[in-house]
Amino acid sequence: MELTNRHILLGVTGGVAAYKVAQYARELQRRGATVQVAMTEAATRFVGPVTFQALTGRQVYTDQWDSSVPNNMAHIELSRQADAIVIAPATADFLAKLANGLADDLLSTLCIARNCPLLVAPAMNREMWANPATQRNVARLIEDGIVMLGPDEGDQACGETGVGRMLEPEDLVEDTIAFFAPKALAGKQVLITAGPTFEPIDPVRGITNLSSGKMGFAIARACRQAGAQVSLIAGPTALPTPRAVRRIDVTTARQMFDAVQAALAAPVRTDIFIAVAAVADWRVANASDSKLKKTAGGQPPALQFAENPDILASVAARADAPYCVGFAAESEDLERNGQDKRRRKAVPLLVANIGHATFGRDDNELLLIDEDGSTKLSRDRKDALAARLAQEIARRLPPSD
Ligand code: C5P
């Protein structure tokens, strides 16, 4: 998992967004992290320490003078065990303390005594965020190498709208994973197709497939976490857009083809193309502009099919082709058929799904096939597999000029 062996000291300060941080703590653990919570006294007014204690299975520290900690040196003990400290929510007051090196309670003392990275997720009213003092403090924190997670823009608990709200827990998790992820794709431009396509029969009917888009979206997320700029061309799916990924929605294979060509024509060169979409091989050539009607005793419609363009093969055939990665769902003799498909499409790397029951699931098992043979990525969550795949792609990239 992406956060296995990571120990995170989670500092909760006194903002209403503290209630969302319980969910964040839970998600961090689900990704393999261990979480130790420390709270300011004000934070305990919003959420009881028992909540975090129950979620993390660890004692929650709130008091600088806690005599149950060995040597009564909680600030050193707790911060020395952590791979990172994350403060969420971080109030304007706490940011001010951090910026000025104050240490008048347990959490601020932990921060100043740390020898690990510090990440902060600000949460406050928009006027408090825009206040020159807060902005000055934030600039100072960034200068000091402290990582800012957000804030986000939108509705605020006080009823106003603007910049200052805490990132949603799932975005905080993504940014935390991104912080730890090796930046193997730093500076790379990645283009990904994902999901199914939908080929109309008439204005209300069509032909599609069971692809959920989960694997392609997970790869988009993982590439961004590995430092890449990512564009994601998605067929019809209700999945949320991964953080900081540019998404273009399409419906048909031909629209997907056009969107890919347009992305490749952009002034910024695409370094890597990953074709994860389950593109329909055929479209209905005689699709009707009006809804087909069933008439009593009438004949069912006779659909004619035309072949769709092979997006991956067309990209791989370009003189300026990016590094191309294809996907395959083969049922028999995975390695031989995969190797044949890789050569046929003229791509350096083909990723075969092991078993075909992967559609819609959250886990998968992959076989990576390149000119040297094959490597298996054993069964795991799709997002963990995607992170491993991003590293495997990075390792295979030709040296850049
Ligand atoms: O030929 P097949 O559909 O098995 O190949 C699968 C690979 O080719 C996937 O990477 C898929 O995204 C890509 N593909 C494509 N355009 C098509 C058909 C498949 O890009 N029309």
Image (cartoon, rainbow, N blue to C red):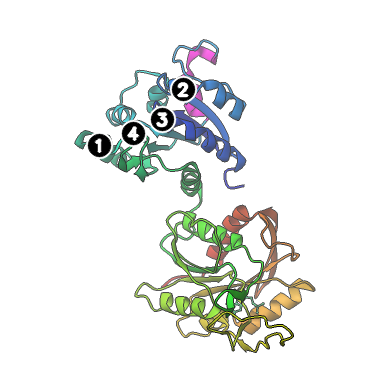
Picture layout, residue 396 above or below residue 80: below
Answer whether labels 4 and 1 touch (C-beta < 8 Å): no
Picture layout, residue 380 above or below residue 157: below
Q: Looking at the image, which residue is at 45% across and 33% down?
A: 85
Q: Amino acid at mark 2?
A: Ile
Q: CA distance from mark 4 to mark 1?
A: 11 Å
* Label 4 CB sits under 8 Å from any ligand 1 atom: no
Answer whether labels 3 and 2 touch (C-beta < 8 Å): no
User: Callout 3 environment at 10 Å: few (<14), some (14 to 19), or many (20+)?
Assistant: some
Find residue 274 and report its horizontal and vertical position in percent. 54, 70
User: Callout 4 environment at 10 Å: few (<14), some (14 to 19), or many (20+)?
Assistant: few
Q: CA distance from mark 4 to mark 3?
A: 10 Å
Q: Which residue is mark 3?
A: 16
Q: Looking at the image, which residue is at 38% across and 18% down?
A: 105
- Relative placement, left or right, of 135 versus 200 is left
Label 4 vs 3, first from the N-terminus: 3
Q: Dot 3 lies on which element?
A: loop
Q: Which residue is mark 4?
A: 158
Instruction: Between residue 125 and residue 192, name the one nearer to us.
Output: 125
Q: CA distance from mark 3 to mark 1?
A: 16 Å
Label 3 vs 2, first from the N-terminus: 3
Tell me the mark number nearer the camera, choosing from 2 and 1. 1
| Residue 76: image tag | 2
Q: Looking at the image, which residue is at 60% across and 59% down?
A: 214
Q: Which residues are magenta?
A: 69-81
Tell me the mark number nearer the camera, choosing from 3 and 2. 3
* Label 1 CB sits under 8 Å from any ligand 1 atom: no
Q: Amino acid at mark 4?
A: Cys
Instruction: Inspect the magenta stretch and tell me whether residue 74 lies in it.
Output: yes
Q: Looking at the image, which residue is at 40% across and 21% down?
A: 42
Q: Which residue is mark 1?
A: 127
Label 4 vs 1, first from the N-terminus: 1
